[in-house]
Image (tube, rainbow, N blue to C red):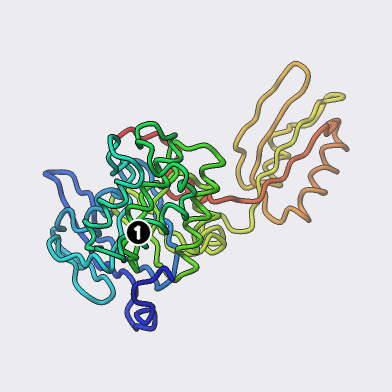
Amino acid sequence: MFMSNPSSLGSKYPAILVRNLRKRFGAHIALDGVGFELKRGERLGLLGPNGAGKTTLVRCLSGRIRSDAGEIKLEGQSVLPEAVGSAVLGIVPQELAIYQDLTAYQNLCYFGRFHGLRGSDLKFRVAWALEWTGLKDRRSQLVRHFSGGMKRRINLACGVLHQPRVLLLDEPTVGVDPQSRDRIYAMIDSLSDEGCSILLTTHHMDEAESQCDRLVIMDRGRIVADGSIDALIERTIGSTRWVRLRFRRTQDAIDFEKLIDEFSTHIEEFIDFEEGSVVKIRMNEVARNLPLLIGQLEGNGIAIEDIEVHAPSLHDVFIELTGEQLRDD
């Protein structure tokens, strides 16, 4: 069993409860009344553009910094920087928190002792971790010689050796190849299957969709959305679909954009080429409106050469809520 105290899963308290959290750095407001909860056994994705406040939030949750106001409760207990229960909370940072000049085995032993493991318990957990990461045969190699994916797996193992009931995962697959990502996902699955409650921050929309039960999206220090992917799509984009048409005019045609406007809620893109044109529109009730649009176009001297229909994705939700402007802060 992974869990150090499975009976705690029956508790009435959520794994993490955050209320009206505020944090300011000088004139910059990093957290502006943030509130959400991580349910027991849940995998919650934390998303947001650069500067949204995710890093500050995770540091508050981990006890690395104090908030200016608000409340954080871990399994019903208030969290203070000096009082984060090691048996409850595990932290796996985005930056590799392992020693490059130690072997995989030595790293695991060190972090196991740091988390209070001794004797046979330490020996058992290190053996488990080497098996879990698939690095048993590399136990005596220096971590500096590992690939990026291997380092990520050891980094994850070092953060959960003490069997925490709540885990903060910050960008666990950044910079790794697809095979390593799949292995890390399988490792996370096993933690979740044993009842660990996981808060995962990521910039990968596909990772958030496949690995999380629910999503919280932050922007400019606030929570702007909280719910399942389907609920967020319905709340922001609704039943609209993106439709991309490639066409050419076979004769003098009517005003194309005027006709498109009748069947779309938004024209995203309209490009004319010498050999044809492409338009990308957002359309409601595609099953009814698209055949009508095609009929109108073909009846007015426009030949359709290709059609693509795209269901809304988490990426679309993210852009809808946080905007398209690039942020480097």
Which quadrant holds residue 274?
A: top right
Residue found at x 86% / y 37%: 298
Residue 187's place in the image compared with 138, above or below, is below
Q: Residues within 10 Å of mark 1 (few under 14, many from 20)?
A: many
In the picture, measured across the screen, residue 122 lies left or right of residue 213, that is left
Query: Looking at the figure, which quarter contains the C terminus?
Result: top left
Label 1: element kind = helix
Task: Return the x and y of residue 68 as percentages of the image width and height.
Answer: 13, 58
Q: Residue at x 18, y 53 (%)?
A: 64
Is 252 drawn above or below residue 186 in the view shown? Answer: above
The quadrant holding residue 198 is: bottom left
Depth check: give the residue in front, 245 or 13.
Answer: 13
Tally of numbered discs:
1
In the rendered image, which residue does mark 1 sit on? 160
Q: Residue at x 77, y 23 (%)?
A: 276
Q: Position of residue 100 (x, y in %)?
A: 30, 36
Q: Nearer the viewer, residue 141 or 132?
A: 141
